[in-house]
Image (tube, helix red, strand yellow):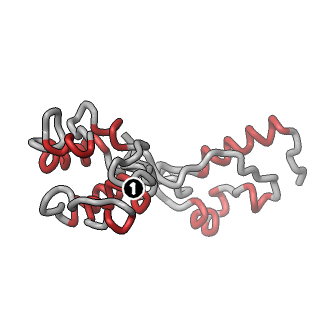
Amino acid sequence: MQLISSPPLRTIVAAIVLATGCGDSGTGSDSNGTDAASTSATDPSAGTDAASTGEEQTTDAPTTDAPTTGPGVVSYTADVQPLWDARCVTGCHEPGGGGLLTSGLDLSPALSYAQLVGVMSVGAPALSRVAASDSMGSYLWHKLNNTQVDVGGSGNQMPVGGLPPGDLATIKSWIDGGALP
């Protein structure tokens, strides 16, 4: 079997292999949801992959560790902002609210995301309010968990009385998932 050595042909072969080897779930299933590896092992007419034919494989295709849409992805607008609206905005983190006096943090829908992600914290200047993909490096996470003093911050847990575990899990998933808008 001849190896494909021309760069344009390698790119085309790689694109075909990727297109035919990746189903909706990205796990190598075919259009019927059958795993391509198990199909080819039991059905010789199901085709072969590049490794078994001796063709050159490339790894130039971009990959992502976390999905940006679909089940399990936390949406800032749909999942996180409603938590701020219910527990943090009214009376505290809104224009004229008490929370703005010390932190300057407005969690109203129009401004909250831009005031959180990648913005240095007032309470612990060595940390961002939200460090994308790093809940433990996010001052917000420490304020929500009452560990702010451990990272050089001060004050009380926010919101007063804390958040339920499910809400904390949503926020942690959002931060650790890249703090996407």
Q: Residues within 10 Å of mark 1 (few under 14, many from 20)?
A: many
Looking at the rendered image, the quarter that the N terminus falls into is bottom right
Where in the figure is residue 27, as x and y percent of width and height? 53, 58
| Residue under numbered circle 1 | 138
User: Residue at the location (32% across, 66% down)?
Assistant: 149
For the C terminus, the image quarter is top left
Horizontal placement of 17 versus 89: left or right? Answer: right
Query: Please, is residue 179 above or below residue 141 in the view?
Result: above
Q: Position of residue 112 (x, y in %)?
A: 28, 38
Dot 1 falls on a residue whose secondary structure is: loop
Question: Can see residue 72?
Answer: no
Relative to 174, 23 lies left or right: right
Depth order, front residue of 37/85 = 85
Is residue 147 visible in the rendered image? The answer is yes
Q: Nearer the viewer, residue 19 or 94?
A: 94
The image position of residue 53, as x and y in percent, is 79, 58
Residue depicted at 81% across the width and 52% down the height: 56
For residue 81, above or below residue 141? above
Give me the residue at 17% from left, 33% from top.
95
Q: Amino acid at mark 1?
A: Ser
> As drawn, is 84 to the left or to the right of 4?
left
Question: Residue at position x 37%, y 48% from top?
Answer: 121
Q: Is residue 9 left or right of residue 21?
A: right
Q: Residue 133's x, y, as percent?
A: 45, 54
